[in-house]
Amino acid sequence: MGFIADALARVKPSATIAVTNKARELKAAGRDVIGLGAGEPDFDTPENIKAAAVAAINEGKTKYTAVDGIPELKQAICAKFERDNGLKYEPSQVTVGTGGKQVLYNALVATINPGDEVLIPTPYWVSYPDMVLLAGGEPVIVEADKATFRITPEALEAAITPKTKWFIFNSPSNPSGAAYTRDELKALTDVLMKHPHVWVMTDDMYEHLVYDDFEFTTPAQVEPKLYDRTLTVNGVSKAYSMTGWRIGYAAGPQELIKAMAKVQSQSTSNPSSISQWAAVEALNGPQDFIPVNNDMFKGRRDLVVSMLNQSKGLKCPVPEGAFYAFPSCADCIGKTAPSGKVIENDLDFCAELLESEGVAVVPGSAFGLGPNFRVSYATSTEALTEACTRIQRFCGNLK
């Protein structure tokens, strides 16, 4: 037996981070690379939020805090859930972590026993299955419709077993941008109501990033009877352009929240005190910049979807939210790249695109669904136009 834990052998490194790092390496070596791998807004954190962080530093709010969040932030989170989602929570039902990823991980570590199954629809955020594995559980993949990137109630029903502990739900989705309407979500919650042993972990990180009058809803809002077995996870990273500040949060049953705090107390302890005060301002302060940013994202989405659909061999549905497109490159499989390599899957497609044209995208197989690839349009219109022009050229040069 080697020195490294056996559990790590079951886990893959993050594919999105790997693509971003590869693009950075090529740039450092002098290559002209456009990176469309990172999942973070290119907008700066709003000035009022930055000012709140500076004020926290100047006022000496730089000490340890309560393990899972300062009271002021928990109150702001309670107000947010009531304002935006019609959900009432007490501060004792709220936890704050170092980003949404830690909150999700804490919940899994606090609840998973060996053999417990966690349902994860495709295409999924790369970290869900690996976090389940690290927690000692078994990820069970629920196949989505490849055209809509949504699962059906029938597929959810078929995947549930007596061992199912959690259903992880993410809408709008990373990587596809697909989002479930209230009626589509109600059809899923109707299934869950028949299985009281299954809990819901809903990742609402892209809640505010929706387009074309799409109305966001979350499971406990659509089916109030699920309230007592739902962990509603969110954060300030995406809507508030605060990815590096590392603040995620969740609300749910008090017993679960206490268990998650216990996990956090023995891992990181409290999130950054300064970031917490910035998050108070983010949630309580003006929200008027969100629709302004969304208009810019929508314009970029429309540009990217149009240009990708004009690329030979690509098909790209229109995403309802987030800032990702998830085109299929199925019609490019079997063709020969300019390097002479035959493209056998989405991994080959992305590797050859990076090598040939200097455009970094993430293979769909990393998200459990290929042959697709993820394009992040959270970058400038100029960079997106140039990147999509290169993608068109690359596809046109396939033989």
Image (cartoon, helix red, strand yellow):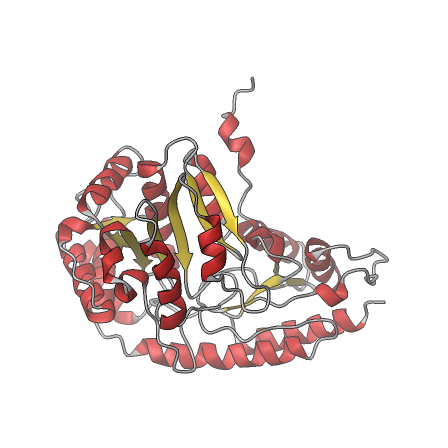
The image quadrant where one finds the N terminus is top right
- Residue 67 seen: no
Percent coordinates x, y for residue 316 in the rendering = 61, 73
Q: Is residue 7 above or below residue 388?
A: above
The image quadrant where one finds the C terminus is bottom right
Percent coordinates x, y for residue 251 in the rendering = 24, 53
Identified at 38% across, 82% down, the residue is 213
- Residue 104 seen: yes
Q: Is residue 84 above or below residue 232?
A: below
Direction front: furthest residue: 194
Q: Nearer the viewer, residue 132 or 261?
A: 132
Q: Nearer the viewer, residue 119 or 136?
A: 119
Left or right: residue 88 versus residue 354 is left
Identified at 21% across, 65% down, the residue is 80
Percent coordinates x, y for residue 377 in the rendering = 53, 70
Left or right: residue 115 versus residue 219 is right
Q: Nearer the viewer, residue 143 or 52?
A: 143
Q: Is residue 94 above or below residue 33?
A: above
